[in-house]
Amino acid sequence: MTGILLFATLILSVLLYDTRRRIGRLERLIPDHQALDHAVPVQPERPEHQEVEAIAAPDLDFQPPAQFVPLTSDSGAVPTPAAANEPEPGEAQSEPEFEPASGPESTFPQRAIASWTGLGFEDLFGRKLPIWAGGITLIVAAVLMVKYSIDTGLLSPVVRVIMGLSFGGALIGMGELARHRQEVVRDIRVAQALAGAGVGGLYAAVLAASNLYELVGPGTAFAGLTAITALALGLALRFGAPCAVLGLVGGLATPAVVQSQSPSVPLLAGYLAIVIGAITLLSRRQRWAWLGIGALTGGAGWSLLTIAMGDLDSGSTLAMGLLVILFGLGLPALAMEGRSAPILRAVTGVVGALQLALVVARGDFAPLTWGLYGLLSLAFVWLAGRTPILQRTVAVPLLTALGLIAIWSAPDAGLFAAVVVGIAAIYGSYALRHLWHVTGGLVEVGLLGAIALGGYMVSFGKFYEGNTGQDLRFAVLAMAFAALPALGAGLGWRSSERLGDARFALLASCSGLLVVLAGMVGLPEWCVSIVIAVVAAALLGLSVTARDSRLAKGALGFLSAAVAALVITIETTGELARLFQAASVPHPARAVLRWATLCIVATGFAWRNAGTVLRYALQPLAILLGYGLVAQLVPAAWLPVATAAALVALVEGGRRRPALAPGPALATLGGLLVLWALEPMGYWLAAGALSLGGNPVFYTDLPSVGVAMGRLLVPAIALAVALWRSPEHQPAIVRAGGAALSGGLTLVGVHILFKQLFTIGDYAAFVRVGLAERCLWQALLMAMGALAWRYLAARRIAVGLIMVSIAHNLVYTVALHDPLWAKQAVGPWPLVNLLLPAFGITFVGISILFRIVPDRAEYWTRIGDALRMSMILLFAFATLRQLFTGTVLPVGEVLEIENIGRSVLAILLAIGFLLWGIRKSLRDWRLASLALMLGAVGKVFLFDASGLEGLLRIASFLALGFSLIGIGWLYTRYRH
């Protein structure tokens, strides 16, 4: 009883959904203003004494939309709306009235009024649903009658079944009678309910005879249920959707409810094909799309269940395969029309392909199953050529087929080859046919790419074992697969749509990829980068010929892969080691060929993209590959020289052909030169950092002459020439940076070479000639600055060199290694020694700076005067010390006479500062004079006088006194 009620509820739900759908369709067909036009007008209340004119009757001639087709009556005539009666001329006009036409559902305006006034709910639950519920109740009553007879034992099983069949037939007859007496019944749904109840009663009677009483066998019951299903479908043509629903449910349920010890899969397939086909045709005829979709869904469910159970023999496999093809492609083409039809065909086609793939897998990939899949593929591509939406789903059966051959365990080579060729022939021919058609596009490109790449990769994975001779065979196979996308690209060579999208570029790139795979399999490993580079060059040339920028971008990808392969497939680390140091390579010819090929190809790419933003990547790549080529040919020591020569040559080439725009290439060469200079610069900077702590810089701590020349001076000269010959429109920061780099490399290189002149390798040599070396170096720097200013008008370079000279003098000669307190040989001769240049460098340098930058002299005058006075003091006291000690000043004790000489020297220097300050009106000099005099006075009174006696003490005070009087007199004279 519960099952019957559930079945009745299901039918009621379907009918309710159908009713709501039809009401919604009517509401959409009738606009609001039309419903308002046919509403009953409401007359406002008027006073009785007021005279009003008679109101003319409105025009109620309603014209329904052309698309609307109302239900037919028994006679087949289409009911039309009742026309409004037009008043005769001279006839008195009465109040307007609205008279709906007679008949339950025969007039269109009547439904419009119901929709507008909100009576749809009342109409549904007050008039329609009770009729359907009554029909279901009759079915339940029949079941209850049979149950009652069983419980009481009144009737035998045979009588019960006969009565059930008779009751079902009677209900169908009553439905037919109600259909013919429509003027009495006034509702077609009464006939539908009676007919539906009759069909349900027949199903129940046959099921009871078979499963409950076992009066008939499974075959007879199956035939009876099939006949009832056919009857239900036939009644649906007369009574409508309820019978169709019963036929659908009963037809799909028949194989499940009929119990059989030996079910026949071919018989089941034939039954499903007939039933689903009949229901599909019925849905098309009656335009019940939901019925066709439901039938196809149920059929797909039965086929999937049967396939999943497995253990199908050849006949069963063939039957289920043909059934899947019928459900997937045949019946959907007949199920419905309209905009939704292509979507249904696409969905069922995809489902059919997946189900047939399951048939192939469950059938152990037998030739029969592959033949069925091929048949489906042929039908699929045939329909896809006529249904645009199916073109988007052709990839599904293709990818499914590739997935099947990928999971095929231990396939036979002959059968595998036949399957792959069949897949390529079916889907490849379809793709080639539609590729350059108006409806073609990237989907067809994807099909060709999947066939070529997928087919080759699966074949390679299944059969390649690395045996002798296999490499050549699989290389040829890759070239054969490469011909498929190449053919597609060739077919579109003359197409006007070739440049509209990426089809041509993708096909050519796919073919190139397969050629690369062929090279990887058929050639030695060291050739891989060469093959990829050649393919990249070919694609670049093809892109130029075809004027396809997309293909050029694909060629860039192959170039990147070639560079990666060059690094990955290097036989030894010698090729890379030669880029920076001396190393041996087992096969120099191979190395040269690899680097040369990639260098030439990269140079072609850089040349082609000279005017685009890609030059910032391609030009450096070409330079690096060219550098690697040179590194395989020349010793490592000559690589900086070769790089410098390339820099100069490229600058000259850029001057002759400005369109090359070799800026990125020049920057790359400059970067390589900097990398080569890093090591000697590092040694030089390390020694310089230690020298700031007072440690001498020995020539053994610095790079050799050859390194300084090759890595520092030659690159510096090349950079200078490049800056000189480069176009003047270069950014200022580039020129300034290049000049600073060139100047720095030159300064370091010259300093290293200069250190080789004195060969100071230990501390004794440093004491002996260290001061002479520093004085000469500082003098050279100052001389180069003066020459740069005098003859080259390079004021900035001159100022930089002179300031470096002064800084070097102040740090190393004055502060760290001053001869007064550091052991530095100054020479044995008084005045004719190294003290004058040691303390005169800064003095002279300041004077030259003031001449070079006179506009800055006023800002630096005080600092310059302070440095000058300091240098005079140091020179004077160092010279005094040299008179008593000789060449090394810190050696020996200070005698009394030397100590008095320092006081006298201080007084004389104070007088000299004062005279110079008075003459030049320099206040700082006069102040320094006073400070120096005060210091001398203090020294005499505090230190010198305590150590003297007799005449020496008297003489010192006399000298001090006259000096003070003289200074005072000079100041008085200066003020007046």
Image (spheres, helix red, strand yellow):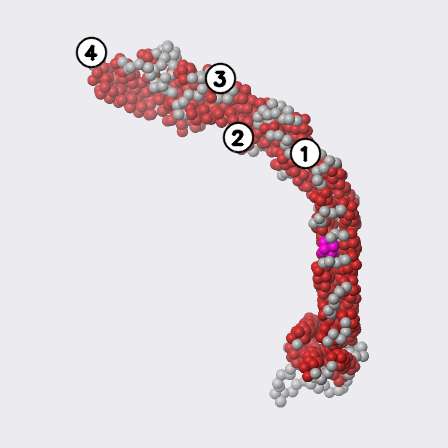
**As displayed, is residue 307 above or below residue 11?**
above
Label 4 near label 2: C-beta < 8 Å?
no
Picture disc at residue 347: none
**As displayed, is residue 159 above or below residue 818?**
below
**As displayed, is residue 851 above or below residue 173?**
above
Question: Magenta span has 359?
Answer: yes
Question: Magenta span has 38?
Answer: no
Report the residue marked by disc 2.
736
Nearer to us of marks 2 and 1 is 1
**As displayed, is residue 424 above or below residue 359?**
above
Picture disc at residue 525: 1
- Residue ID at (53%, 30%): 736
Of residues 931 and 924, which is closer to you in this image?
A: 931
Nearer to us of marks 4 and 3 is 3
- The alpha-carbon separation of the residues under discs 2 and 1 comes to 47 Å
- The alpha-carbon separation of the residues under discs 4 and 3 comes to 56 Å
First along the sequence among labels 2 and 1: 1
Residues packed near mark 2 inside 10 Å, few (<14), some (14 to 19) or many (20 plus)? few
Report the residue marked by disc 3.
756
- Residue ID at (54%, 20%): 706
Quadrant location, the N terminus: bottom right
Name which residue type carries label 1: Glu
Q: Which residues are magenta?
A: 356-363
Name which residue type carries label 4: Leu
Residues packed near mark 3 inside 10 Å, few (<14), some (14 to 19) or many (20 plus)? some
Residues packed near mark 4 inside 10 Å, few (<14), some (14 to 19) or many (20 plus)? few
- The alpha-carbon separation of the residues under discs 1 and 3 comes to 50 Å
Quadrant location, the C terminus: top left
First along the sequence among labels 2 and 3: 2
Nearer to us of marks 1 and 4 is 1
Label 3 near label 4: C-beta < 8 Å?
no
Report the residue marked by disc 4.
951
